[in-house]
Image (tube, rainbow, N blue to C red):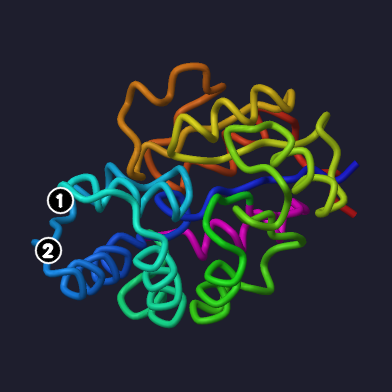
Amino acid sequence: MQPTALFDLDGTLVDSVPDITAAADRMAERLGLRRYVRAEVVGMIGDGVRTLVERALAARGRAFDEAAYRGFCDDYAANAAVETGPFPAIPAVLEALAARGWRLAICTNKPEGATRALLAALGLADRFAAIGAGDTFPVRKPDPAHVRATLAAAGGDAARAVMIGDHRNDVAAAAGAGIPCVFAAWGYGQPAMAEGAAAVARAPGELPALLEGLVGAPAMP
């Protein structure tokens, strides 16, 4: 069975904070609120866009606003790849894994439309066998069913799969699905979020060896 690597997106494959912050700032401007700084936005990422907007508004003393949420979603989807880019070495790591026989998939809480638009803009869309986004299935991380559904869509098997992510939701969802998780320490998550992970990668270049150490190397033709 070909092994599968399931990747979180924001904070794992791409640094999306600049464009998320810009969209949050435009939302704030529309509402007459103070702008945001990167550190604030980093702490809001990981639980989906609705929660991000809820946290952003709460940080300015405002209750959740459905119209503001919808406006943020539309704005961000149209501007998701202005300043966002892959973390250093990520494209090379994805290429190396694919060349070694790994099946690759995305398991993210980001909406599917924004995810696909971003991957296409970055030239990464053809790397992945499946995309399990925050609205692709009825559930999302930390629910392990999100991982299982994404894995099934990619044609993978839990016995030879690894999750890679930078948030406690990635670790928890992988554990519930019965697969190991490699914590991406270069991302947005705090070190304490790595608790329960099978391994910690300090840089993307460590991933191939770590993944093969967890499930074995792919059978090469």
Answer whether residue 159 is magenta in the image: no
Q: Which residues are magenta?
A: 88-106
Question: 65 above or below 210?
Answer: below
Label 2 SS: loop
Q: CA distance from mark 2 to mark 1?
A: 7 Å
The percent position of residue 199, horizontal first and vertical second, equals 51, 25
The amino acid beneath tag 2 is Leu
Identify residue for label 1: 60
The percent position of residue 148, horizontal first and vertical second, equals 77, 38
The percent position of residue 37, horizontal first and vertical second, equals 13, 56
Q: From the viewer's perspective, is 145 left or right of 45?
A: right
Q: Residue at x 80, y 34 (%)?
A: 160
Quarter of the picture holding the C terminus: bottom right
The tag on residue 33 is 2
Q: Mark 1 and mark 2 in contact (Cβ < 8 Å)?
A: yes
Q: Residue at x 36, y 50 (%)?
A: 52
Name the one closer to the observer, 126 or 138. Answer: 138
Q: Residue at x 41, y 47 (%)?
A: 51
